[in-house]
Image (tube, helix red, strand yellow):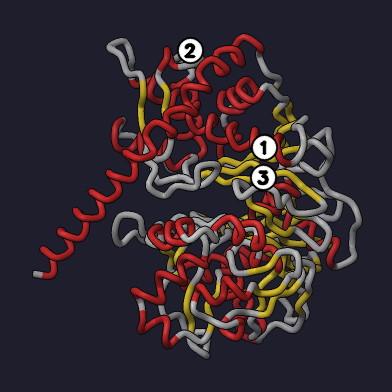
Amino acid sequence: MEYIIGVDTGTSNTKAIAFSFDGKILAASNQSYPSIELQEGWHEQDPAVLLNSFITCIRKVVDQLPGHELLGVSCSCAMHSIMAVDEHNGPLCNFITWADNRSASYAKELLVAGVSERLTIETGTPVHPMSPLCKLMWMQQHETGVFGKAYKFISIKEYFFFYLFGVYVIDHSTASATGLFNIKRKTWHAEALQLAGITALRLSDPVPTNTVFRKLYKHASEALSILDTVPFVVGATDGCLATLGSNAIKQGDCSLTIGTSGAVRMMNSSPQLGTDALFNYILDESIYISGGPINNGGIVLKWYAENFLNRKMESESDLTWFAETANTATPGSEGLIFLPYLFGERAPVWDASARAVFFGIHARHLPVHFMRSIIEGISFALYQVMLVLEKNVSPVTNIYCSGGFTTSSMWMQTVADMFNKPVILSTVRDASATGAAILGMKALHYENRFPITEANQKIFQPERKHHQVYQELFPVYVSLYKSLKEQFSELDNFRNKTITRETIDVLK
């Protein structure tokens, strides 16, 4: 039997899935890995660990299918990562990921200078510390040795493709998430490059997402246990491919993902240039993905469970336990509202200084109320993003869900109730890897249809009485950030001074 592999490299794990050409899953593999947090607000990943996970996942899938013919590999990867390498592709530092906030002051500088809205609209990437543009501005000032030695500044997938084929290429989708790329012209953006202190020569060559590479390096084919003639499709970003893989492809369809973080997205034939509140990323030469990401998804449940409940959150069953326990509290958590900005926030406030708040605590509140309010607060954040999409893109008819949270029927029903929309769960194992496989099939001209059918779905319908509860609480939720924005900034200044004093004490 012939098959294709979709491989997705994410924040906490890499997944590879083998699909037959009728959409059946033949084999799968998963590799988890830790992140590196040297200090508060920093978030890095080891390039060697990521590359080894990428290789291992593909090889394990191939090993499960002896006698079957691999016709291609298509790639998905997390956005916004950046690393400096020398002319031999040797890493000069770790990857700085989307979750890293060290460049927050540079994002603020661009905002104060009055250029952030123009840059967001022209590059598709909101000005925020997640953006490689801001990361490069920070690196130029704080890592002068690394910055000066760097031959190229590359993302995770670019690192993989140099290992595989010895070329520096970046797909248009990943490029559109750098803050350095003009999404209409599909070329590097001159003003952004100047702000970052680099020229286009220090970046990879942009290529369409359906670009195919052949003739693997010998060391790569041996490590992967595949023929060197197996083609690799460069693919797109995990967010764009999750939209495709979850089957949110019709007018009015919206994709919602909650994993470590979260996002709401819609497909468009052109970028939505009238607002700087949304991202506009490229899926392929004719489709843009508009939407907004949040920083705080399942990672907040992990934080609360491990620090306050003495319970490890390591698997899907742990998330299900958390949600089902939370479900013993009634919708609305008896007036307890959670602002989920534990790790700062992206859409729709785009404020790295924002922080989490439990609001409305009273003596009757128990741990289950805090647990439910966390789930509801994360869902409120995504609901707020959906409203921005409806205002600027189109009304939402159906919500297609993916990510780790889909293991919980309670959370899926909460989203349906809050959004007052049908929530559709595709039973595909991983939407981003599935999207990569779909894109790969089309790029390799093997298939011209999507290997997902409507029969392969579960639908959660909203309950009106619960929606009314959430409609009463939502205005209070929205008002909290507006009321506390200045205080968040003051606390951020306090924390930065504290960190500086602690660093000086250590050096002494």
Residue 66: horizontal and vertical position, in percent? 73, 65
Residue 387: horizontal and vertical position, in percent? 65, 33
Q: Which mark is residue 401?
A: 1
The residue beneath circle 2 is 330
Say which amino acid is labelled 3.
Answer: Arg
Q: Are there few (<14), some (14-19), or many (20+) residues within 10 Å of tag 2?
A: some
Pointer 1 or 2: first along the chain: 2
On the picture, is 59 further left or further right than 144?
right
Residue at the spot x=61%, y=27% of the render? Answer: 415
Pointer 3 or 1: first along the chain: 1
Q: Disc 1 and disc 2: Cα gap in Å?
A: 23 Å
Q: Nearer the viewer, mark 2 or mark 3?
A: 2
In the structure shown, which secondary structural element does the residue marked by tag 1 occupy? strand
Quarter of the figure with residue 17: bottom right
Quarter of the figure with residue 457: top right
Residue at the spot x=58%, y=55% of the render? Answer: 117
Say which amino acid is labelled 2.
Answer: Thr
Say which amino acid is labelled 1.
Answer: Cys
2 is higher (above) or lower (below) than 191:
above
Q: Disc 2 and disc 3: Cα gap in Å?
A: 30 Å
Residue 23: horizontal and vertical position, in percent? 81, 49
Is residue 321 shown to the viewer in this render?
no
On the picture, is 503 further left or further right than 232?
left
Q: Which mark is residue 429?
A: 3
Q: Which mark is residue 425?
A: none
45 is higher (above) or lower (below) than 476:
below
Q: Are there few (<14), some (14-19), or many (20+) residues within 10 Å of tag 3?
A: some
Judge by depth and name the residue closer to the eye, 271 or 77. Answer: 271
Residue 69: horizontal and vertical position, in percent? 81, 67
